[in-house]
Amino acid sequence: MKIDIPSVVTMFGLLPFLASSVSAQQKEMRQVHLNVFRVDAAVVAAQARGLFASEGIAVKITRTPNSTEQMRGISKGSFHIASSAFDNVLAWSGKEGAEIVAVAQTTDKIVLPVFVRPEIKAWSDLKGKKLAVDAVDTAFALVLRRILLANGLDLKRGDYELVPAGATGLRLESMTRGETFAGILNPPFDDKAVAAGLVRMGDHLSVLPHYPGGVLAVNREWAKKNREVLVGFLRAWLAGMRWAKDPANREEAIKMVAADLKLSPKAAAGSVEELSANGSLNVPGLESVLSLRTQFGFTPPMGPAIATYYDLDYYRAAAGK
């Protein structure tokens, strides 16, 4: 075998350079810390298809045990982007100094089912019982209060007690242990609730038909200082959303989500189907969340003007609008 010595020398001479180049590229990857209650299908697709990487972004995902830890982390800069309910933005923007704003929408509409323990046969059976929520004064806790109010139960009257059990999985555990007797258990935990013998009593649609799905929220100061990073993240996320929602990719997307999030095919399909049509914020829907909050006497720290709590600029830049 004839060896071309100059070629070998050249090849080995390039190795340190190539290693240095790869290392430099890795260092140039900008870190984005995403905090979620659960990972959406668009994030899964964007990660798997290298869309974040193509924007020079490395996404670190942390699942939160509750909204307090999530929003406090956004306020302090521990997390950069939060996937959350818009009501958490209202509750926490300005609460500890930092302004928090919604920049995109993960789901346009949601169904928030109320599950109860099997011994509960009617709404009235919840009188005097402990009910599981994330935090007692935010998001789905207020939705639960509105549902119960429509069914003759009033927290102000002392008809029941709210227990801050944490995120959906923790609420489910609290109920199955018999510590609490009802709670909102949104997908994919609704299937787990049924399997655990819990009973679906109703949902929010009859009283809050325009209540919106989740949003992506950021610390306004961080967003201003890292505009390019945020726009790049949203651009990749939107591309992942479009790919996952394309009927031609449906089967592959479901398999991808099921494998990545360890979901059943049915739950994975639901995760894909619930994605927003285009990721744009539904401002009238956000206003309905604000109205619910003020109804129960929780005026946001930054005041009652809805425009204070969202910023369309980053989405528009990412979507090319």
Image: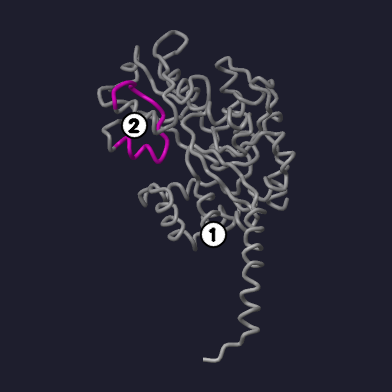
Instruction: Identify the residue shown where x is 45% and y is 47%.
Output: 271
Pointer 2 local density, CA inside 10 Å: few below 14, some 14–19, many at least 20: some
Give the secondary structure at mark 2: strand
Q: Which mark is residue 216?
A: none
Query: In the displayed image of the protein, which residue is found farthest to the top?
Result: 157
* Relative side of 100 to 159, left or right: right
- Name the amino acid type tagged 1: Arg
Q: Quadrant of residue 291?
A: top right
Q: Which mark is residue 200?
A: 2
- Asked if residue 181 is among those painted magenta in the image, a careful observer would answer yes
Q: Quadrant of residue 101?
A: top right
Instruction: Identify the residue shown where x is 63% and y is 51%.
Output: 57
* Relative side of 43 to 157, left or right: right
130 relative to 134, above or below: above
- Name the amino acid type tagged 2: Arg
* Label tally: 2
Of callouts 1 and 2, the N-terminal one: 1
Instruction: Identify the residue shown where x is 30% and y is 36%.
Output: 194
| The one of 90 and 221 positioned closer to us in this rendering | 221
Its colouring scheme is one colour
| The one of 81 and 201 positioned closer to us in this rendering | 81
Q: Which mark is residue 49?
A: 1
Q: How much space separates mark 1 and mark 2, taking CA atoms? A: 37 Å
Instruction: Identify the residue shown where x is 63% and y is 33%.
Output: 77
- Asked if residue 260 is among those painted magenta in the image, a careful observer would answer no
Residue 179: where, in percent of width, then height? 32, 21
Q: Which residues are magenta?
A: 177-194
80 relative to 151, above or below: below
Residue 312: where, in percent of width, then height? 70, 40
Give the secondary structure at mark 1: loop
Query: In the displayed image of the protein, which residue is found farthest to the bottom?
Result: 2
Residue 23: where, in percent of width, then height? 63, 58
